[in-house]
Every structure is written in C-alpha cells, then in structure tokens.
Image (cartoon, helix red, strand yellow):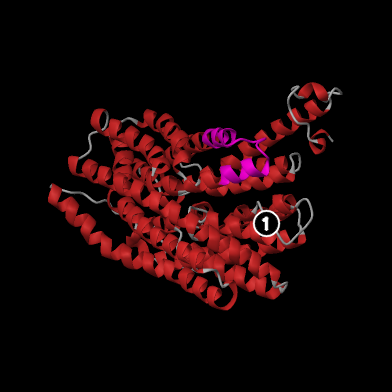
Amino acid sequence: MKESVSSVLPISFIVLVLCLFVVPISSGLVLSFLIGTAMIIVGMGLFTIGADLSMTQIGSHIGAKMTNTRKLWFIMLLSFVLGVVITVAEPDLQVLAANVPEIDTKVLIATVSVGVGFFLMVSMLRILFGIPMKWLLSGLYLIVFILAFFSDKNFLSVAFDSGGVTTGPMTVPFIMAMGVGVASIRSDEKAKSDSFGLIALCSIGPILAVLILGFIYNDNAAATSAMLVNEFAVSVDIGKGYLAAFPDYFCEVAVALLPIFAFFLIFQIFSLKLEKRPFKKIVVGIVFTYIGLVLFLTGVNVGFSSLGYVLGGSLVEKNMTWMIVPLAMVMGWFIINAEPAVHVLNKQVAELSAGAISEKTMGRTLSIAVSIAMGIAMVRVLTGIPIIWFVLIGYIIALILAFFVPATFTAIAFDAGGVASGPMAATFMLPFAMGICNENGGNVMTDAFGLVAIVAMMPLITVQIMGAISTLKSAEKAAVPDFVSAFGDDETIELWEVS
C-alpha cells in the first residue's frame, strides 16, 4: 500500500493543484477523481501483492515444469495458451480497448491476446536455443515497419499502443517468472541473462496482430466505444455512478481471471501437485488480484480517466497550450513510479547485475525516458505529425545501439520499454491526450493514440545508453593494472571478480 500511495499520489497532487488554481473543472468531477484515486491506490496495492503471490508463482512453477517434460510441442502449445489467457486479464489492455472508437473492444482484446500468445512461443524458442536477441529484434521490427507503411493509418497508432499496454502488471510478473523457470533448464552461463527479453518479444506480437487486423477489419459498429466522460451534477450521482459500475466490473474481471484459475487448477491436479500451504497462498493471491483489479478498473473508468480527458480539453479551450508539453513532461517523470511492473523489473535487474545497476539508477534512467516521451507525445498531439516517423527513427537508433552494447542490456532495455507503458499512461495520460486532440480539432485515432507507444520506445534508447556508459566504465577499471588498490584492507577479494 505504501508503494501504491507513493506511486499514485504525485500525479494526483499535480492534477488537483491544476484543478484548484489553474483550470476550472466541475466540483463533481474533481470529487469523483479523488474517490477514483483512493480506489486505484487500494486496488493497485491489493493487485500487486495478489500478482506477486499468484501470477509470479504460477508462472515460475509452470515454466520449470513444462520445460522438464523436454517436449517441444508441449512447451509451445502451453506457452501459446498461457500467453492468451494472461493477456485477456491485463487491466491496461482493457482500458485501452474501451477507449478505441473504431475497433470493437472484444475483437481488439482477442487480437492482441493471440499476438502475445504466438510471440510467447517465439520467446520460449529463443531461450531454449539461445537465439541472439539483437538479430531477432532487428528482423521482427523490419517486418513491423514494412507492414506499417501499408496499413490503415487509423490502426497504426493503436497497434503500437497495443504493444505497450499488453506488458502491464498482470503479464510482466507472470511472463518474467516463466522465463526464469524455462531458462533454469540450461546450464550455460548465458541462461540467466537470456531470461530477459520475453517482454520485448511479447510486445511485438500485438503490434503485428493489430496491423494485420487493419487489413481485414471493416466494422465500424463499435464507434460508440470512444472515451465516455462521466459528469456529476450532485454528490449522490457520484455514489450512484460508482455503484452502477461495480457489477459490470465484477463480471468482467471474473471472466478475465477464470481461464487463468481454471488452467492452474488443471495443472495442479495433473502435474504440479503443490503442497497445501503454497497452493492456498496462490488461491489467496488470485482473490487479492480479483478484488484489486475490480477496484482499479472501477476507479479508473468512473473518475480518473474522465478528469484527464476534461483537463486536457480545458487547457486548449483556455488558450493554455503552452503549458501542455512541460506539464506532460513533469507528469511523465512521476508516472513511471506508478507502474508496479517497473518495480519488478528494477529488482530483477539489480539481482542479475549483482548490484552493478542499482534499482535507483534504473529508476532514474526510466524517469528521464518517460519524461522525454511525454513531451514528444504532446508535440505530436498538437501538431498531428504521423507516428510512423517517431517510432521509425526511435527504433532504428535502438536497434543500432543493440549492436554496440552487451546483449543483456539490450534485452533489459526492450523489457523496460514494455513495462514503462503501464496503468498511469493508459488510464490518465492517454485520455488527457484525447481531450487535447478533440478540442484542438485533430484526429484522435491518428494523433492521440500512439502516446503509449512513444513511452514504450524511449527506454529502449536511454537504458542502452546507460549500458554503454556502464560498459565503458568497467573497461576503464579493467585497464588499471593494480587490482589490489581497488579493494580495502578489510575486504574479501573474490578471484572471479578480479579475473
């Protein structure tokens, strides 16, 4: 809960100051926002502990167990099924899909889930056979950009956004734990570092899947699923609004989590056979995940996103467009701390590097990346520059860097891109951009969507630059002949470190 409060409170405080002293917003909407903020804090706290108790454990157990079978077809089939069912329950994807006006919500969720499932299979093959990450990423992104130049422009931004939101607080702990479990079967020294990169590859699947969908999908029946703003005349309306939303999200989350729970039970009965205590912990974790997800989605959709949308539109209406870019950059700096999946990644990076890359260093690098990304995204919303030029240049730089930094940093960077674009980006900043775009007379599908994609792209560059600097510093230290001078008189010198 402490982590959740420190994550959500900064952006809520900034928004509240704007509403009280700069931009006039209706009192009902502000009160609804505060209630939504409280629900998001509690929901995210319960969801994070629940995912840690359940999704991480299930992913680790299943990853190790399925690899021990030594049957490639079984590993591939199970990876696909798990990728699909875990993505369906991803809260970030549900928020994005609900806001896309031209694609049916269920169709978009199904398409993205299949894309993640397919690429989770590819990820397992990469770990098992030790395929170099840089070559795989280069080939796949080449396919992505070839398709992008021929795709429907209304699908382009949504496709890249889909790649960002699928790797959120539900999928990241599960997929990363699964990767560690699968990598444990290999005994070579690169096995542990090869467990990174799953998030990066699973982010490509949705991009390709949605781009392909753009060639065959022509149903505009879902045009009404655009951003809905909840306005409240009196306080009683706020209470009724939240109470009316609860049953829908109770059912929606139950449907999303049921396949995961059913899959786990089948696996437990026929293969895992966990002891009673760890089994109960996982069940309790799933219950926490369920309650947390209901609270999170209700708070987001009733109060949080609506204010973001209205605030963005009001800044343009009041001729305060000069504030938008710097304000978004400040929000971006704090938003990255609100992503639960980022904390999971930072801890794993610190462990893998034996403390060489601290959680603090990784956190600052990501904060810089997301702050710059938010500024770029707002420039694009205000000017209408096509997203293809931003992502094309960004990914070219990222892929060139991949050939000059250690492979581990490349995998970590692409994973960081996936986890940086989580709940706060999808639930507040995207509606904020949509409000600006609508008031500015732009095309929401081409100008506002794409924000999450830019947030996912920037860490690929900044983390690899950090890796290059770290490598150069290590090389400088290695060039010093007097190894003993690097250690204190009372320190133990590990011979493997010296060598």
| Residue at the spot 63% in from the left edge and 38% down from the top edge | 463
Q: Is residue 391 something that shows in the picture?
A: no
Which kind of residue does numbered mark 1 sit on?
A: Leu
Identify the residue position indicated by label 1 in the image. Answer: 140
Q: Is residue 210 something that shows in the picture?
A: yes
| Residue at the spot 50% in from the left edge and 55% down from the top edge | 153
| Residue at the spot 73% in from the left edge and 27% down from the top edge | 491
194 vs 103, left or right, is right
Mark 1: which secondary structure? helix
- Measuring from the top left, give residue 481's x and y in whole percent: 87, 23
Q: Quadrant of residue 441?
A: top left
| Residue at the spot 31% in from the left edge and 49% down from the top edge | 39
Q: Which residues are magenta?
A: 345-368
- Measuring from the top left, give residue 260's x and y in whole percent: 48, 68
313 vs 31, left or right, is right
Residue 97: in magenta span: no
Residue 267, compared with residue 334, is above or below; it is below
Q: Quadrant of residue 285?
A: bottom left
- Measuring from the top left, give residue 484's x and y in whole percent: 82, 24
- Asked whether 157 or 239 is in front, the reply is 239
- Measuring from the top left, give residue 241's x and y in whole percent: 21, 56
